[in-house]
Amino acid sequence: MSLYVDRGPARANRTVPPAFTEETRHEAEAQCPVDAHPGRRARAGAAACDGGEGGERDRSRRGQSLRTAESVRAAIRRDERADEFGQPLRSAEPLRAAEIGVSPRRRARAGYAAAAQIAAWARAGTSAPARLPGTAEGFAEWAQYPQPEALDPVSGWRFFYHAHAVRERLRAEHGHFHIFTPGPAGGMGFTHLIGISVDVQGLPIRLFTTNRWVTDEAWQPAAAIGRRVLRPRLAGASPGDVACWLENLVVLFAPDIVALLYARDARMGSGIGPGDRRFEDRRLRIPSQTRVSLAAALRRLAAA
C-alpha cells in the first residue's frame, strides 16, 4: 500500500544520493549539541521517546513570525522554490500554538533526545532515512520507505519517507517524512499531520503541510488534530529508533506544527468541507511551510 498520490512520473532507474556519507559525519555531530545544556539532556539514551506530559504553557514562541508559502510546483526552479519560504505568517496562530500546553522543559528534553540520536547515528555512519527498510541499495526517486508505511498497530499513527525528483526538491533537501494520525473518530483512513524535510545529514530543515489530494487523507481541521502533537504515538512502529526520533521532533516543534496547521486551514479558505474542489486543486500542494533548525531551537529553549 502506498499513501502517496502525488508520485510524479515513474523514474524507477533514477536514484537519490545517499542519505548519509562518511564526509558528513563530523558536520552532523557538530550540529547536534547534545552537551550544550547538560541539565536538559535526554536521560534515557539517544533513542528514548519523550514521555512527559508537561502541563505548563509554552510562551517561548509568543510574538515570533513563522513562515508560510504558496504551493511548490514542479516547474519552478530550485532557487525560486528556496525563496518561497519568504512570506511571513501574520496572524494570531503562533499565539495559539504557544498555548497548546507543551512546556519549554519538555520540548528541550525531546530536542536533546533527537539531537543525541542523530549524533549516535552519525558515529555509526548512518542517519534516519538510511535506517529505513529497503534503503540498503540506495534511494529511488518517489519510492516510499518503508513499503508499506511504518505503522504503530495500537495507535494507528504511521509514517513514511521519500524523495522527489531533484528539480522538485528544495536546495538542501534530501527527502522528507510524512507523519499521519488516525482519521476522524468513528471513521476510516488517516490524516496527514505534518511533513518533515531533512538534509543529507538527516537534520530537519523544514516543516510543511499538504493539501488533501497529495496523500488522499481524511481531512480534519487544525482544531481537531492540533493537540495531538502533545502525545505523538509512533513508538510502536518500526524501526523503533526512527519512530522515537520522529516523536521527539513532533514535541520539539509542536508550536510550529500547530501554527502551520492553522495557517493551512486559512490558506485553504473558510467553510471548506468534504467534497470541496479546493481539496483537489493540483496547483496547491503545500499550503504552509516553515524553515526549522534543531540547533537553533535548542539554543532558544536553553536561553528561555
Image (cartoon, rainbow, N blue to C red):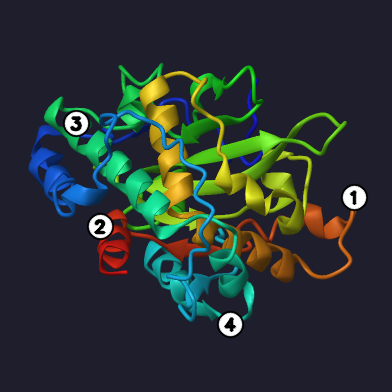
Q: Quadrant of the N terminus?
A: top right
Q: Residue at x 91, y 50 (%)?
A: 275
Q: Is residue 101 above or below residue 160?
A: below
Residue type at mark 4 is Arg
Q: Which mark is residue 274?
A: 1
Q: Label 1 to label 2, Cα distance in Å?
A: 40 Å
How many other residues sit within 10 Å of disc 1, few (<14), some (14-19) or many (≥20)? Answer: few
Q: Give the label, 1 or 2, closer to the camera.
A: 2
Q: Quadrant of the C terminus?
A: bottom left
Disc nearer the start of the sequence (2/3):
3
Disc nearer the start of the sequence (3/1):
3
Disc nearer the start of the sequence (4/3):
4
Residue type at mark 1 is Pro
Q: Which residue is mark 4?
A: 90
Q: Residue at x 31, y 27 (%)?
A: 130
Q: Label 2 to label 3, Cα distance in Å?
A: 16 Å
Q: Nearer the viewer, residue 190 or 106?
A: 106
Disc nearer the start of the sequence (2/4):
4
Measured as percent of width and height from the top left, residue 115 is found at 26, 43
How many other residues sit within 10 Å of disc 3, few (<14), some (14-19) or many (≥20)? Answer: some
How many other residues sit within 10 Å of disc 4, few (<14), some (14-19) or many (≥20)? Answer: some
Q: Which residue is mark 2?
A: 295
Disc nearer the start of the sequence (4/1):
4
**How many dots with numbers?**
4
Q: Label 4 to label 1, Cα distance in Å?
A: 27 Å
Measured as percent of width and height from the top left, residue 124 is found at 15, 25
Q: Which residue is mark 3?
A: 120
